[in-house]
Amino acid sequence: MSSDDVSQTPQPEKSPAGVSARSGSFPRSLASARRALTDGGGLHLSAPTLRWGLLAVAAGAVTAALVTLFVTGFENETGLEAHNPGAPGHTVLDKEFGTAAKGDCLSWTKPDRSDLVKVSCGSRHLFEVAADIDMSRYPGVEFGPGSRFPDSLRLTELKEEHCVPAVQQYMNGKFDPRGRYVVGLMYPSPEGWRNGDRTLRCGLQFSGSTGTPLPSQGSAVEHDQSRVFQAGTCLGINQNLPTDPVDCAQAHAVEIVATVDLGAHFTGGPPAKEEQDKYVEEQCANAATDYLGSPEAIRDKTLTLFFDYVDARSWLAGSRKLDCMIGKGTDREGFAPITGSAKGEILINGQAPVPPPNSGRSTPAPLPGAAPLPPQPRPR
């Protein structure tokens, strides 16, 4: 795997409580947010830059999962054989998989996907078919009768060769590489392959940080591709980085307080980062106040407000939305674990937060041996 396939994760700098922050890829700091969050609070906070390379984690593009995340096979013993509907006990399943065509949405509940069914794309689903490709028509003997089942590396190559362009075409050239969807590949089981099934199905799925598909509603073609969550959602924490939605009573990295629709304010081409910053920080600061009940709450809980930005590629693909998140950044480690919703009592690293005085220390005490890193380049 080349270095281009591996997302680099920069480390964060320290940010004082109560200051909004953004990174080059997830959150990055904005000094003027202190005015929105601390008016009347008597705080005079600095705003060092926070740069976390978290988008790859949030989008599920974890390095360890690059080969397995987007390559979905069927692990039941007999497989789902698109061209062998007579296989005992799998007639309905074979029909569902074998007849899945462009625009169909698929769902399942079992880990081996043996209960796969076609569903309306308006309902909860796990995979949206962008194209079905019969590899038996592929030149040469690689996919001919009696050919060997491809290994994971070859399947990944097939995804890149066939599914990436198929998804781009399906999305009319407007696929957001930073959005909620990833390119997926569904392929026959080894048993199905031995029985002659050579059909690959390319599509889109909303994938979690570990590669587990997350439910989605609505066709990707018709909806904003922004990776956003409902207010009140907490994103879990693993190695101090956000993961997937969890109950807020469990340890988590951030809590979503609102979603901002940039399309309500910017109607032309992609807005500059500075313009987004000014608008989004105000919207997120107001949303955090409404969500928590007072403008002092975020400071008293020693939390920080975070948000992303929409880059030009995402904007041109139609993505317009961003989440406002609150969490506790640490010096070098990413995020501190929080338990409980910020609307009520919370614990940070197992301890109740101590509100800072209205005058006195302006920034949290640094962790032992920790020092902020200089701003890091954003991963591409």
Image (spheres, rainbow, N blue to C red):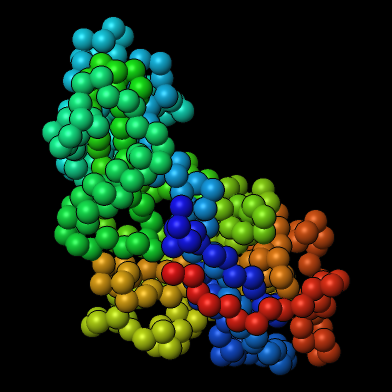
Q: Is residue 95 above or below residue 123?
A: above
Q: How many dots with numbers?
A: 0
Give x and y (percent) for residue 284. Answer: 50, 76
The residue furthest top is: 88
Q: Residue at 58%, 48% (x, y): give it.
A: 246
The residue furthest front is: 140
Q: Is residue 111 above or below residue 206?
A: above
Left or right, 305 with reference to 76: right
The residue furthest right is: 368
Q: Residue at 15%, 37% (x, y): give it.
A: 139
Left or right, 330 with reference to 1: right
Q: Nearer the viewer, residue 146 or 251?
A: 146
Q: Residue at 35%, 62% (x, y): give it.
A: 177
Give x and y (percent) for residue 329. Answer: 68, 70
Instruction: Please say whether residue 38 is visible from this viewpoint.
Output: no
Give x and y (percent) for residue 105. Answer: 26, 38
Q: Is residue 286 above or below residue 103?
A: below
Instruction: Please say whether residue 193 is visible from this viewpoint.
Output: yes
Give x and y (percent) for residue 182. Answer: 36, 52
Q: Nearer the viewer, residue 41 or 275?
A: 275
Left or right, 254 with reference to 93: right
Q: Residue at 43%, 88% (x, y): give it.
A: 274
Is the C terminus in the top left, top right, bottom left or bottom right quadrant? bottom left
Image quadrant assignment for residue 301? bottom right
Q: Nearer the viewer, residue 24 or 9?
A: 9
